[in-house]
Image (cartoon, coloured by chain):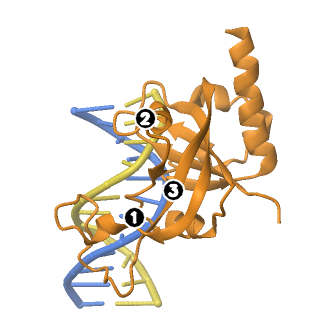
Chain colours: A orange, B yellow, C blue
Amino acid sequence: MAAAYWLFKSEPDVFSYDDLARKGSEGWDGVRNYMARNYMRAMKVGDQAIFYHSQATPPGVAGVCKVIKTAEPDMSQFDPKSKYFDAGSKRTDPRWDLVTVAPVKKLAFVSLEELRSVPELIECRLLAKGNRLSVMPLTAPEFKAIVAFSQKAGRRG
DNA sequence: GCCAACGTTGGC
DNA sequence: GCCAACGTTGGC
């Protein structure tokens, strides 16, 4: 089966694409939404993902990363000192997972405003009003359109 | 099982 | 800081 495509949101003040590039890999912890978790459980090694900066000025796309390790329990759920602690999750039946990602390439930044002008993205959940999902699937055309737009913007700028 | 209240996310 | 959207919680 062909690789799937995804999008991860991160607040760059907390963890940016450059942080990922510097570290080399990162366990994507802290996801506490069932839909997002289920998407992570569906990810396979080699799947590629857009790294999106939320809560930024402006928000937008910063890079491409890839899954290098499939879902496993996110240990921060068991740590009472972690802000991601979940008292209702048992070690024998962990509620929350993470995947591990690595950088692929930094992209010329594409703002959310610019993404709205990409025809392939009209139906993308990322652009839906009130969208709060931090991990979401992308279709191959959506993923490719984002990368292509960035490459075009990079040559222009 | 319904639904109002509440908390969080995220753009602006 | 504000507000809209939406997921979760809790009373009934």
For marks 2 and 1, give the CA distance: 22 Å
Mark 2 / mark 1, whichever is N-terminal: 2
- C-alpha span from label 1 to label 3: 16 Å
Q: Chain of mark 2?
A: A
Residue at which label 3 appears = A100
Number of numbered discs overlaid on the protein picture: 3
Q: Quadrant of the N terminus of chain A?
A: bottom right
Q: Are marks 2 and 1 on the same chain?
A: yes
User: First in sequence: mark 3 or mark 2?
Assistant: 2
Please give the label number shown on residue A50: none
C8 vs C2, nearest the viewer: C8
Name the residue rendered at 65%, 25% in the picture.
A114
Between C2 and A79, the one nearer to me in the picture? A79
Judge from the rendering whether residue A2 lies leftward or rightward of residue A122; answer left or right. right
Looking at the rendered structure, the secondary structure element under dot 1 is loop
Q: Nearer the viewer, mark 1 or mark 3?
A: 3
- Callout 1: few (<14), some (14-19), or many (20+) C-alpha neighbours within 10 Å? some
| x and y percentages locating residue A13 in the rendered image | 35, 33
Residue beneath disc 1:
A32
Is residue B5 found left or right of A11 in the rendered image?
A: left
Q: Residues within 10 Å of mark 2 (few under 14, many from 20)?
A: some
Residue A122, position as x, y percentages in the image: 73, 41
Q: Which residue is mark 2?
A: A19
Q: Which numbered disc, 1 or 3, marks the residue that appears first in the sequence?
A: 1
Tell me the amino acid under the disc marked 2.
Asp
